[in-house]
Image (tube, rainbow, N blue to C red):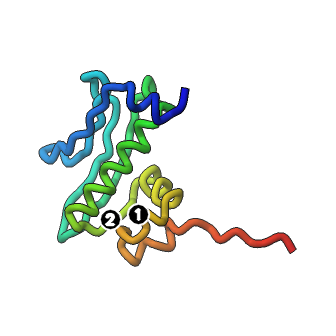
């Protein structure tokens, strides 16, 4: 089954739980994971992402990262991707998200340049 179809067939909801400073992903009414953040001075620092082992491999982490980063853009927040999962997601999708990253951290999430075989 195609991954997009799998996600569409799941009852998935992502919520910004501002009291606990985290985006949560719920699947079929059950908390399946979260990305923790801190807000400060027009910036959002993503500190930790966790997906319940029962739900790993279903694309929920990527869906959660995408929603959190899209929301940061909507709220005009600069991103500090301290969390390795979020940093890697940005590294894999630089055209969509690299511009959100604070300049001092962009080198850390810029994909490596592939050298041509010589």
- Work out whether 4 lies above or below 117: above
Which residue is disc 2 drawn over? 79
Which residue is disc 1 drawn over? 97
Image label count: 2
Looking at the picture, tell me which residue is in the foreground, 8 or 65. 8
- Is the Cβ of the residue at disc 2 closer than 8 Å to that at disc 1? yes
In the rendered image, residue 45, in percent from the top left (x then y), is placed at 30, 60
In the rendered image, residue 94, in percent from the top left (x then y), is placed at 48, 64
Quadrant occupied by the N terminus: top right
In the rendered image, residue 108, in percent from the top left (x then y), is placed at 50, 68
Circle 2 Cα neighbour tier, 10 Å, few/some/many (<14 / 14–19 / ≥20): many
What residue do we see at 42% from left, 40% from top?
61
The secondary structure type at the circle numbered 1 is helix
In the displayed structure, does residue 14 sit left or right of residue 112?
Answer: left
Residue most extreme to the right: 118
Q: Earlier in the sequence, mark 2 or mark 1?
A: 2
What residue do we see at 26% from left, 60% from top?
72
- Work out whether 109 lies above or below 59: below
């Amino acid at each position: 089954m195609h991954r997009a179809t799998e996600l569409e067939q799941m009852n998935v909801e992502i919520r910004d739980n501002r009291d606990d400073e985290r985006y949560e992903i719920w699947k079929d009414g059950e908390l399946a994971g979260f990305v923790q953040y801190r807000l400060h001075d027009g910036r959002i620092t993503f500190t930790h992402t966790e997906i319940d082992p029962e739900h790993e491999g279903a694309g929920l982490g990527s869906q959660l990262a995408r929603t959190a980063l899209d929301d940061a853009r909507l709220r005009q927040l600069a991103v500090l991707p301290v969390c390795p999962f979020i940093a890697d997601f940005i590294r894999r999708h630089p055209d969509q998200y690299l511009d959100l990253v604070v300049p001092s951290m962009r080198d850390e999430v810029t994909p490596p340049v592939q050298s041509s075989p010589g």
